[in-house]
Image: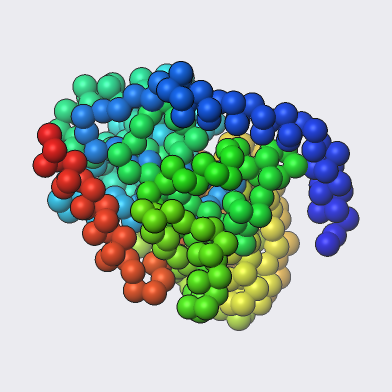
Amino acid sequence: MNLANLTLQSFRIVLLPVSILYGVIIHIRNILFDKQWLKSASFNIPVICVGNLSVGGTGKSPLIELLINHLILKYKPAVLSRGYKRKTHGYVLANETSTALDIGDEPMQFFQKYPNLTVAVSESRVVGIPHLLQDRPETDVILLDDAFQHRSIQPGLSLLLTDYSDLFTRDFFLPTGNLRDEKKSYKRADIILVTKCEADLTTSKREVLIKEINPLPHQQIFFTSLHYATPYHIMNHALKKSFNQHTDVLLVTGIANIRPIKKILNEQTNSYEQLTFSDHHIYTLDDLKDIEKRFNKLKGPDTMILTTEKDAVRLIKFKDQLDKLPVYVLPVQHQILFNEESILLEKITGFIESFQKQQ
């Protein structure tokens, strides 16, 4: 463990009393919802919640995209998110003029990939859903992005994600740990996904993890690994570039967890350097100048700047400068392990069909 990590860990331990107080507040809040002293709203439409118990990246965005790819073939889905770090307030419906500053990076990523998809943001999901349905009455299923902890809405189906290398069962409340909800809140989930697993996860290891999580009888656990496709140029998606053992990379990121990307670069490139910003960082011209300066220091016959899809939607505003730089975007998607993708998607479709039959 390096000095920086040791210092951070020591600082977090010092904040243990704050974590305990935070945990007490969350516990009381959950009791109020469980006793229905605080009310949860439900809607006459299938609502699917995707979220986690912790802060940080567990792969929610790739899972939302997996669901969109499946649902859009048969339904008219919509995505409702908070729009973290956007410069607007209240309810906003994405349109052709929207930017990441208007709706946030993740919703902008969804809208860019699926221009015909309804994407909206609202700090209050309870307020956002009626607005969305008024704007897009043809919507027949809503995906709530990062909303597991928002108990003011009662979703019809809840998908809970937890990182293979940082299971919620081993975590503690903020700020000592990363939990923003109680561990026992996993019982509210219908489906649990252990994400970012090793692609060759064994059946025996799978059973150990299932035992640790201890699912309820109605809960089913799925396991996923991240699959990275060939990077594409940020300004010309048709222009693709693979990296290899001769490639030197400048990795530019402003996301919560870059461990999987670093693992890929360690295995598949000659070398890489990092330029790391805070999660959801809003890039400036000075940042871009720093990126170019750092990139120009790379030596070797094969060099590139690599970033993520979330970062790309925050960088794209610098179109003129990016046209001149070899900035490539690394696309990522979930691979459902043990050949269970069809089972997962059938459960999603089954929920929607069952909901519709009851209406």
Q: Which one is nearer the viewer's eye here, 76 or 141?
A: 141
Residue pictured at 12% horizontal, 34% vertical: 359
Q: Position of residue 133 (x, y in %)?
A: 23, 26
Q: Which one is nearer the viewer's eye here, 169 or 242?
A: 169
Tally the numbered discs: 0
Instruction: Using residue 265 as the reference point, say whether residue 234 is left or right of it.
Output: left
Looking at the picture, does residue 134 appear above or below residue 237? above
Image quadrant holding the N terminus, namely bottom right
Q: Which one is nearer the viewer's eye here, 18 or 284?
A: 18
Q: Position of residue 213 (x, y in %)?
A: 54, 58
Looking at the picture, does residue 66 appear above or below residue 77? below
Looking at the picture, does residue 38 appear above or below residue 80? above
Q: Position of residue 281 (x, y in %)?
A: 60, 39
Residue pictured at 46% horizontal, 18% vertical: 37
Residue pictured at 21% horizontal, 22% vertical: 134
Q: Is there any visible trace of residue 134 in the rendered image?
A: yes
Residue pictured at 80% horizontal, 42% vertical: 12
Q: Which colour scheme is used?
A: rainbow
Instruction: Using residue 60 as the reference point, say whether residue 353 is left or right of it.
Output: left
Looking at the picture, does residue 66 appear above or below residue 114? below
Q: Position of residue 110 (x, y in %)?
A: 36, 45
Q: Is there any visible trace of residue 198 in the rendered image?
A: no
Instruction: Using residue 285 as the reference point, say whether residue 351 is left or right of it.
Output: left
